Amino acid sequence: MGGTCPKLLDPDMADTSNRPIIIKRKKVVINSAHHGGAWKIAYADFVTAMMAFFLLMWLINATSEEQRLGLAQYFSPTIPINRIAGGGSHMFGGKSVTEEQLLARSGRGGLPTEQSGTPGTEDSKENVTVGTSDDLAAVQDFLVGGGGESFLNDNLKKHVVTRLTDEGLVIELYDAPDDPLFAENSTSPTPIMIDLVEIIAKAAQSVANDVAIEGHVRAEPIILRESSVWDQSTGRAEAVRVLMQRFGTPKHRINRVVGHADRELVSHVPRDVRNNRIEIILLRD
């Protein structure tokens, strides 16, 4: 009996050896959502927005009022004169175009007056210089009314659009429906046109830039045998030149007087009255 296997003698040991071996493997689920790239895009957008914000704050603090105006006009080159009118009901909103308080507020020196010498004299030449981009922007701001005021009443504002270009400060005067700037088929200016030219001539005295005057008219009906668009556009530009000199612009500042007939229409409708217009340009040096 000494050679008997212990497993056969011990029933508990025999049961243990016959049991199946069970291996349990625990499944671990790892959430990998945070490894995606969506958060990186959102973070980049946030950082870019913050950088743009601080850059804007720096530009506001580092630039002058005239420079900010120039930046605004660069991104919005066509600026209609549709500002809030002044409290007065007269041509200059109740104030004079040569009023010293208004000139100081707009950052400009006094316009030449009778006391400082008539336009074209030696005194005026010494006090007035050729305007830079900032000076032209100041003239534009003076016309449209800095600080929310306008020197043009509602009846005049609807005729005017200004813009700064590479050529200079362009002041466009348009016909309005039932409210023309010249008598129909004529070169005779209406009272509204005379008032507008007076304001522009006074404002232009703050700089010594040359002035260009260009006339445009709408197309005439095709049935007409002879067209007068060339004569009308040139005659109207000449009439404005006469008014500019009457209101103080010296003749040596007139650079050119041109008529474009109906060759440069601003409306896709050839007979639109807005095609009847005059451009007064304060030319860059």
Image (tube, rainbow, N blue to C red):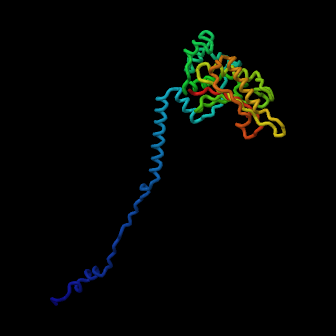
What residue lies at 38% left-to-right and 64% top-to-bottom?
Answer: 28
Placement of the N terminus among the 4 image quadrants:
bottom left
Name the image quarter holding residue 234. top right
Placement of the C terminus among the 4 image quadrants:
top right
Name the image quarter holding residue 182. top right
Looking at the image, which is closer to me, 147 or 197?
197
- Give percent across and percent down for residue 18: 30, 82
Looking at the image, which is closer to me, 179 or 7?
179
For this orientation, the residue located farthest to the top is: 115
What residue lies at 35% left-to-right and 69% top-to-bottom?
Answer: 25
- Give percent across and percent down for residue 43: 45, 47
Task: Using the image, determine if residue 67 lies above or below residue 15.
Answer: above
For this orientation, the residue located farthest to the left is: 2
Task: Using the image, determine if residue 117 lies above or below residue 37.
Answer: above
Image label count: 0
Name the image quarter holding residue 152. top right
Looking at the image, which is closer to me, 235 or 149?
235
Image side of residue 12 versus residue 82, left or right: left
Image side of residue 179 versus residue 208, left or right: right
- Give percent across and percent down for residue 19: 31, 79
- Give percent across and percent down for residue 24: 35, 71
